[in-house]
Amino acid sequence: QSALTQPRSVSGSPGQSVTISCTGTSSDVGGYNYVSWYQQHPGKAPKLMIYDVSKRPSGVPDRFSGSKSGNTASLTISGLQAEDEADYYCCSYAGSNNIYVFGTGTKVTVL
Amino acid sequence: EVQLLESGGGLVQPGGSLRLSCAASGFTFSTYTMSWVRQAAGEGLEWVSTISAGGAGTYYADSVKGRFTISRDNSKNTLYLQINSLRAEDTAVYYCAKGEEMTTVITPFDYWGQGTLLTVSS
């Protein structure tokens, strides 16, 4: 099972919006509505930000939103804030054998 | 408050074995799917293994299948990962993660521990 493809880095100024893509195949992202997104600050454990493509856990700001089209999922951060600077990983259910696959990760920089 | 505390990491020689543990508290451990995810230094997250709430269902990444065994003791609220035939490429921080759903292994990871570092080197 190959890792899902994410851009290595994206950047934006405070207040702007950035979108991170996560490209897989019909066997993972395209085949199921079970894509989640995780935020990881340096030296910290990952934090769930989005699940089931577009659902937000309690406590996650509504600046974070998720979507999917075909084999590509996306995470959009609107109204970018300094504390959003972190690494972001997508994750998809991939079927009954290797059940999860993570993305390659994207570093978000707030300029 | 949900807490997950991993332990058991350390320096191990190639070919050796180790058991990682994850002590859980703050939720009804026996009703949730649990998983292990690892991260090599400077690298991305890699799903390793998942176990269903009752322990009957276990799932592994191809990279660890046949060498790693996930298990749980619901009476002790503890998750385990037995790692055999260790290789240098197993060097990573190992996180345990709680599933958000109770009734299925298809679930996002809603709480994570702080991780335990395993280093495989001679």
Image (cartoon, coloured by chain):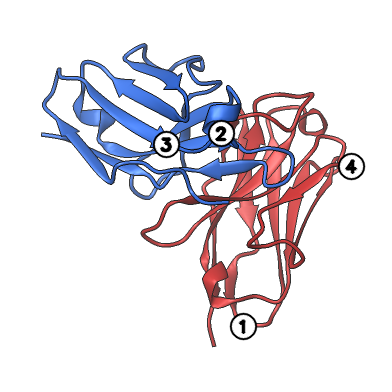
Q: Which chain is red?
A: B
Give the secondary structure at mark 1. loop
Between marks 3 and 2 in the image, the one whose residue lies nearer the viewer? 2
Q: Residue furthest bottom?
A: B122
Say whether mark 2 and mark 3 are on the same chain.
yes
Chain A's colour?
Answer: blue
Q: Which residue is mark 4?
A: B56
Locate the C terminus of chain B by quadrant.
bottom right
Same chain for the residues under marks 4 and 1 in the image: yes
Q: Residue furthest top?
A: A62
**Same chain? Circles 1 and 2:** no
Tell me the amino acid under the disc marked 4. Answer: Ala
Q: Nearer the viewer, residue A27 or B96?
A: A27
Q: Chain of mark 1?
A: B
* Residue B96: % across, % down: 62, 46
The nearer-to-camera label among 4 and 3 is 3
- Tell me if mark 1 has few (under 14), some (14-19) or many (20+) residues whose alpha carbon lies within 10 angstroms of its own: some
Q: Nearer the viewer, mark 1 or mark 2?
A: 2
Instruction: Check if mark 3's residue and mark 2's residue have beta carbons within 8 Å.
Output: no
